[in-house]
Image (cartoon, rainbow, N blue to C red):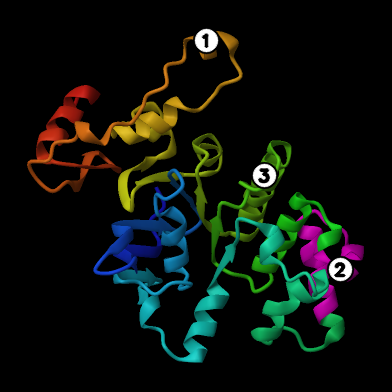
Amino acid sequence: MKTEKILEVKHLKKYFPAGRNRLIKAVDDVSFDIYKGETFGLVGESGSGKSTTGQTIIRLYDATDGEVLFHGENVHAKKSRAEKLKFNRKMQMIFQDPSSSLNPRMTVLDIIAEGLDVHHLVKNEKERKERVEQLLEAVGLNKEHATRFPHEFSGGQRQRIGIARALAVEPELIICDEPISALDVSIQAQVVNLLKKLQKERGLTYLFIAHDLSMVKYISDRIGVMHLGHMVELADSEELYKNPVHPYTKSLLSAIPLPDPEYERGRTRITYDPSIHDTSEEPKFREIRPHHWVRCTSKEFEQYKKELGE
């Protein structure tokens, strides 16, 4: 178990106004830690709040309440331009849609070098060009691609450019916000394998956000499951797959197809029904096994423990 916490999310809330006297609670009291060198997977269906969580952590949104601590410092307390720049260099983001996250009027050279320019990380044009060419090769592209524009590339290649841009400033933590969901299935594995390779080479830490639990299991050390703004379950990747506790997690896992016709013929899809939950008290995040947490009431906690044979 890794011990050095790089990120601590404490009771994070992000609410959006929605008309008169109404709030959308996109992220509602979410807490988790990320350790140096690990990949923390965050999964859930569309509207679960997982992407809003990532975007609030990196300050694309201001938090409504709660804290985000990066190396023990409160991210949302950083006010000056110098503080924000220092933070932005240490934490980067890879976006869902590479087509809309890359400026179509800029060459690949200028897109990747943007961070180098902002943080004054190169001395001259020659060094700038060399750094970009090194980054292109690191993500499996050619240095000749530097003079081209985004529209000249496939979706998978554009996502590699987005990864190179994130790597340019040598960050410690990268938030991968559904980085493969806009790609063909055949390309998804290539991009995930690239991320794993870069992590090993550069000692990176990832927050990997996705709705595909099978891909998240492949890349993640630990997984948090989100539903309607809440974290409902959190465990090591293997533990979550072998011993899912929350009914919503079970429903997500039951939807994963396997390349086995016999299994598929007998596979039972579990439909999640929120009305089954005990409403006698407010649910809390409770540790049902070592490092395995579930959001439940005390009555549900006892029921889940029996199911696990604890």
Q: Residue at x 50, y 43 (%)?
A: 211
Report whether residue 245 is seen: no
Looking at the image, residue 262 sits to the left or right of residue 188; the answer is left
Q: Secondary structure at mark 1?
A: helix
The three-letter code of the residue at mark 1 reads: Arg
The three-letter code of the residue at mark 2 reads: Ala
Q: Residue at x 82, y 73 (%)?
A: 109
- Crowd class of label 2 (few under 14; some 14 to 19; many from 20; radius 10 Å): some
Tell me where residue 47 appears, x and y as whole percent. Answer: 42, 50
Q: Residue furthest right?
A: 144
Counting labels gives: 3
Q: CA distance from mark 1 to mark 3?
A: 30 Å
Residue 193 has which mark? 3
Q: Are marks 2 and 1 in contact (CB under 8 Å)?
A: no
Tell me where residue 95 appears, x and y as whole percent. Answer: 60, 60
The three-letter code of the residue at mark 3 reads: Asn
To which residue does mark 2 refer? 146
Tell me which label, 2 or 1, sits earlier in the chain.
2
